[in-house]
Amino acid sequence: MRSHLLNGLTAEHYRRSVTEGVERVAAKLATTDRPFTGVTVDRLAPAIERIDLDRPLGDTAAVLDELEDVYLRDAVFFHHPRYLAHLNCPVVIPAVLGEAVLSAVNSSLDTWDQSAGGTLIERKLIDWTAARIGLGPSADGVFTSGGTQSNLQALLLAREEAKTDDLAELRVLTSEVSHFSVTKSARLLGLAPDAVVSLPVDHDKRLQTVALARELERCARDGLTVMAVVATAGTTDFGSIDPLPEIAELCDRFGVWLHVDAAYGCGLLVSRRHRGRIDGIERADSVTVDYHKSFFQPVSSSAVLVRDAHTLRHATYHAEYLNPRRMTEERIPNQVDKSLQTTRRFDALKLWMTLRTMGADGIGALFDEVCDLAAAGWELLAADPRFDVVVRPSLSTLVFRCVPAEIADPAEIDRANLYARGALFASGAAVVAGTKVDGRHYLKFTLLNPETTPADIAAVLDLIAGHAEQYLGESLDRAS
């Protein structure tokens, strides 16, 4: 069994095995003509159930053959131009190369004596990101597993900075379309069930600053402590960007921590044409960024940034076997001092490889392309009487629904759109997402692939309309 351990004696075995795996994935990428096969749970589950994990195949080639049947053949491929569903981006090759390197070396980014150069590379990328945001010379941060963890850590710091022992009096103010992780984090942090106050949004799905000011005043009047305002730079459903300068003004006036969830909108940090859309982000106390959403990085690659590095002390614990206090005195850089995690992958390497190969402008140009694509898609939807589109995109998301002219019942329109989404997924021809707006079912394009074209969008819209019409025709047949 030692022949499977990666070391100097097995380097050639490693090279052959990885090459074979890469060749199979490359062949799959080159020949995949749709984002999904349409396989169902009932069809795929028995194949996996039949596998006896206590009877190994013993050979990686045989395992790859099996993997074709239980995973690769039916995987959902985000690189395909008609994958238009969730916040999943196609990935750039330098980042995939970085993934291969970090997996093989297997550094753990908790302490210096496990990572050395990896620690310094991560710190350099944190400094670079903080500078792009404009947080100032005292900023710091750490890589995380994703936006949910980043938001949790930011709110942990905000809770501790609120300096109160009465968790029942703490409040978090955010928009009604902010990410669910805000409420989830509040529960994990022991706040009251009603601690998160969801505020109304305007026609463009942006937090209403009048409502925010009113709630800040009410909390002050009622003796409640607003521990944080969470603004969103790129909501999951609409890609909407809250009015950051106005929100920052209110937070300054009331002395409240401002967290900006820019998990999606962080791509604008490297945009040469649309950076102004997130002006005001530099005034935040903490910021979430997800490189694996809009920097075209493989999952996972995220970070939480803070204006004041000293606030990260709230996540610091010292263990004699790992990061004793004397290491701080000796100025040994241990990233575990800043992180909620202990063992942690060297995910920063993927972004490092990308920036050193493509540069920030190269990433930004790709993100600008998908923003432009969304604008073109909005024009298509706005001009098409078969569809109702909710808001003009701020980033690269379009929320809409099919509205057949012959149907007036909103519930029947809901069912037609749900059917169309399901039928499209089952066909494998395209993958789109869904959400609710004012209680009604809508469909959603999240456009993160620069290879997608307006023609792809038009073709998928035709497929959606066709499935909706098929449902309505069958519904009329059943009713007659």
Image: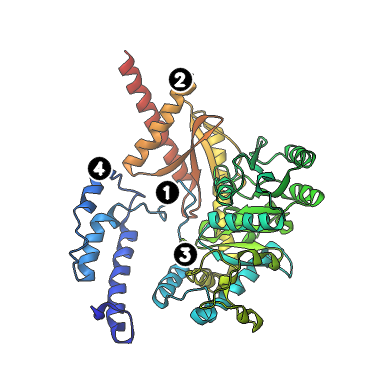
Residue 104 percent across, percent down from the top left: 39, 76
Tell me the kind of residue under disc 4.
Asp
Given this view, does label 3 or label 4 mark the residue nearer the observer? 4
Numbered marks: total: 4
Please say if 269 is above or below 463: below
Question: On the rendered structure, is 275 left or right of 437?
Answer: right
Q: Which residue is mark 4?
A: 42
| Residue nearest the observer in this picture, 347 or 198 | 198
Q: Residue at x 62, y 56 (%)?
A: 156
Mark 4 crowd level (few <14, some 14–19, many ≥20, 10 Å Cα):
few
Q: Quadrant of the N terminus?
A: bottom left
Q: Are marks 4 and 2 in contact (CB under 8 Å)?
A: no
Q: Residue at x 45, y 25 (%)?
A: 413
Work out whether mark 1 precedes mark 3 in sequence or the reverse, and give the earlier one.
1
The image's colouring method is: rainbow
Mark 1 crowd level (few <14, some 14–19, many ≥20, 10 Å Cα):
many
Q: Which residue is mark 2?
A: 407
Quote the CA–CA distance across marks 1 and 3: 16 Å
Work out whether mark 2 precedes mark 3 in sequence or the reverse, and give the earlier one.
3
Residue 469 percent across, percent down from the top left: 38, 27
Q: Which mark is residue 83?
A: 1
